[in-house]
Amino acid sequence: MSQATINTVVNGVDVERMGATVQAVQQNPTLAAFQFRAANRWITGGHNRSTIQSFYGAGQEDTVRTQPFVLDADEPPVLLGEDHGANPVEYVLHALAACLTTSLVYHAAARGIRIESVESRLEGDLDLRGFLGLSDTVRRGYRQIRVHFAIKSDAPAEQLKELTTFSPVHDIVSNPVPVQITIESR
């Protein structure tokens, strides 16, 4: 007699492991504290390179990543760069898209909502007069970001939109975050 197996993977997410993680955090809230890190080095002009490898989470230093992720940033020629990578504000759009998508997929999986596909397109409006110091009334960053999703799922659009509200990056770009800057002279 064969034993039936229960499919615990929804949208590529192991919901059994997710449930165990949620339960562990409920029992020990200190496991929820994470610290992510990035190191950056200027190369020339607008070109700089970040490496991302270590992080602290679930009560310990992560040791799984043996090689760092390497991200090059630069500016397009119209902004005096050599186009060695996306520019920093484009990385913000990528981070937002990735986090909204992950949040949507994970929370849908936890609720048993199946998603067949997710695509998004993001647009951010930025006025260089703020960055260039030409105006004190023009914001230096994005004035607005628009996210357009195309999602194939049986769930209604309102429910899917609600699932994106759990995105940490959405929270980061929507609410002020204290940023402490220190400079060491060499």
Image: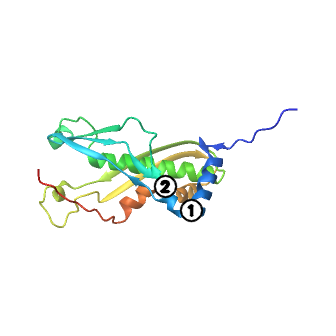
> Quick one: label 1, few (<14), some, or many (20+) residues within 10 Å?
few
- In this view of the protein, which residue sits in the foreground, 158 or 75? 75
For this rendering, which residue is in front, 40 or 58? 58
Residue 76 figure quarter:
top left
- Residue type at numbered disc 2: Gly
> What residue does disc 1 label?
28
Please name whichever residue, 90 or 155, is drawn nearer the observer in this view of the structure: 90
Q: Is residue 110 left or right of residue 126?
A: right
Q: Is residue 85 above or below residue 183?
A: above
As helix, strand or loop, the secondary structure at mark 2 comes to loop
Label 2 crowd bin: few (<14), some (14–19), many (20+), radius 10 Å = few
Between 135 and 168, the residue placed more toward the observer is 168
Question: As shown in the figure, which amino acid type bears the numbered disc 1?
Answer: Asn
Contact, mark 2 vs mark 1 (Cβ under 8 Å)? yes
Q: Residue at x 36, y 55 (%)?
A: 145
Locate residue 41, reporting x and y percent: 21, 43
State the residue at coordinates (31%, 39%). 71
The residue lying at 40 percent from left, 49 percent from top is: 55
Point out which mark residue 90 bears. Answer: none
Quadrant housing residue 4 = top right
Q: Outermost residue, top direction?
A: 1
**Location of residue 127 (image quadrant):** bottom left
Query: How far across and how far down the image is residue 104, in percent?
Result: 53, 51
Residue wearing tag 2: 59
Q: Is residue 11 left or right of residue 6?
A: left
* Residue furthest out toward the right: 1
